[in-house]
Amino acid sequence: MSALLEVKDLKVDLMSVRGIVHALDGVNLTIEEGEIHGLVGESGCGKSMTSRAVMRLLPPARSRISGQVLFRGSDLLPLHEREMRKIRGDRISLIFQDPMTSLNPLMTVGQQIGEVFRLHEGSTAAEARTKTLAMLEKVGIYPPEKRIGQYPHELSGGLQQRVMIAMAIANHPDLLIADEPTTALDVTIQAQILELLKSLQRDTGMSILLITHNFGVVAEVCDRVSVMYAGRIAESADTRTIFHNAAHPYSKALIDSIPKAGGTSKYLETIPGSPPELYNTQPGCPFAPRCAFADDQCASAAPATRECGDAPGHTAACWHPLCR
Amino acid sequence: MTMEQQNVAAGGQPVLQVRDLKKYYPTGSGGAFGKPKKMLHALDGVSFEVRRGEILGIVGESGCGKSTLGRCVLRLVDITGGSVVFEGRDITSLPRAALKNCRRDMQMIFQNPYSSFDPKQSIGSALREVGQVHGQSRQQTEDRIRELLEDISLPEDILLRSPGELSGGQLQRLAIARALLLDPHFIVADEAVSALDVSVQAQILNLIVDLRQKLSMTMMFISHDMTVVEHTCDTVAVMYLGRIVEMAPTAELFANVLHPYTQALLSAIPKADPDLEKQRIILEGDVQSAIDLPKGCRFASRCRRCTEQCRQSEPELRDFGGGHRAACHLL
């Protein structure tokens, strides 16, 4: 495997009414060819910000981006907007949490998916229709001939998300970024969509960056996981290692706070305090004020990301990793 | 076994008895030109009881009627048919004034704490208002607020803050404190932890466990999250399209799932353990519309084991021993 996307020291500052928010503070992330990579963390930790920065969707007037986003070795950040548009929706696609607000309510399903073929491949209307029908079938929307003429409001949430997926994979992207794709859906529908994403990944060999707050989803579909906290990657490892041998105290605490099926204890582990505000960055580790293992070193200097444990590619940004 | 659990096991007094509850909403289409208006069957014959000290979990997917059920048992909406008996009084047709008295004893906690507090009102004022409306003396309210703040481990100066300054977890604790202010006998929590991050969710669930030990709360805990319900509740009722399809004590339900829908629902939950054997039952299609209901079993169109009988007649809840009830022809 080789790296498809390498994010290096990515920093994003946003101008807000209350001052400058350091939304991302040096994110390092590597996504290999053909892997499903999970990006997990709690609200406000910068998961979605990472996807938007990679896609260059942040408003240029109110944001400042530095670092590198290497896609197949070439940096996306200095690209001209015109060149970036060729990458977006073609090499890298993005699907969002709420399909109802991402689809155009005034266009039929066929028009929206067909547009992808017409814009990126220069297909004629008839060609676009044929390709759209094939695409609908591929993402499990039946019967395609009927659905192609329907509007988004005529579809259920699960079907809408399938339409989003069809649009996103229409050009066979190398990377699909799925930002909480099943969070708005019921569990039985979530199971259908996750199954679809997995089988599409197997068939096409694309990589998927799956952004989620749900560790269950991670355990079911991801090959590797990165845990985010306060605009940084706290830990990266393969899925099994994160669950059984987490190095970062934050990853471990987060996993322990999930109610387990068939669990015996009535008390769940909690994390004291709350995540830091991102207006002023403290000198030390951002998790130090809430960490049971923190000492003076943690409070004074931010830990660099280092290899730890035996599992290959297991890295954590911690002075006192739980496994060495 | 805690005292409350013993109470439940010994069959404590029923606090709430719901019989054949129905709630239909007229839908927009039809009506104007003499066509009869179509009805959305949000609840269609729901019966159960909640005993003192029991936490009853209500689970199901969007549109199954679980929130409507919560609203009906507190009579926040009027009921189409059936009865709700709260502590021996039928509240189905109680006049307004009497209902207000009753409401002292029943409270609700909502999903989104940011929208259940007035953004312009300080926390202190929001809490005091509850005592005021229900005619508690000022001193009594103040004392109770201090006590509750201690229970939910928040400092007193939080009373001066406004909701916008607080985190979701802090606000949800305050929402719980507000619900407990008048020492209600019954609480409905509608998706009370769904909007929270897991670490905060864990704090709130622990708080509920603590408070129930201390105050022997009786509660209806509505959630879409099976794992949270399994963790928190004594009894679980699974709903599908306006009906209860299965109901049992929590341990019994999860050890011995009977209804095909519950089986599919449980297997669909992503488990936070990468080593678990995955045997998924993937349900096809979506939930049917609650407007044009089929003649037979409501789950028939998605059920893998559906037979002719299922399409013809609707199954009733039957007892399978040990308080385990399910509505399915095939059992």
Image (spheres, coloured by chain):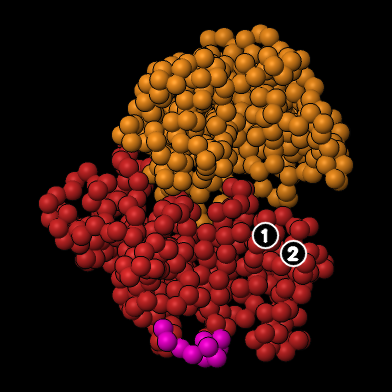
Magenta run includes residue B94: yes
Tell me the quarter of the image containing the C terminus of chain A.
top right
- The residue that appears at 64% across and 65% down in the rendered structure is B116
Using the rendered image, report if marks 1 and 2 lie on a common chain.
yes
Type of the residue with mark 1:
Tyr
- The residue that appears at 65% across and 19% down in the rendered structure is A85
Q: Quadrant of residue A54?
A: top right
- The residue that appears at 67% across and 59% down in the rendered structure is B114
The orange chain is A
Residue B140 visible in the current orientation:
yes
The residue that label 2 is drawn on is B119
List x then y, in percent, for residue A217: 48, 36
The residue that label 1 is drawn on is B114
What hue represents chain B?
Answer: red
Real-space Cα separation, disc 1 to disc 2, in angstroms: 8 Å
Type of the residue with mark 2:
Pro
User: Which residue of the protein is positioned furthest toward the left in this rendering?
Assistant: B308
Magenta run includes residue B109: no
- The residue that appears at 76% across and 35% down in the rendered structure is A23
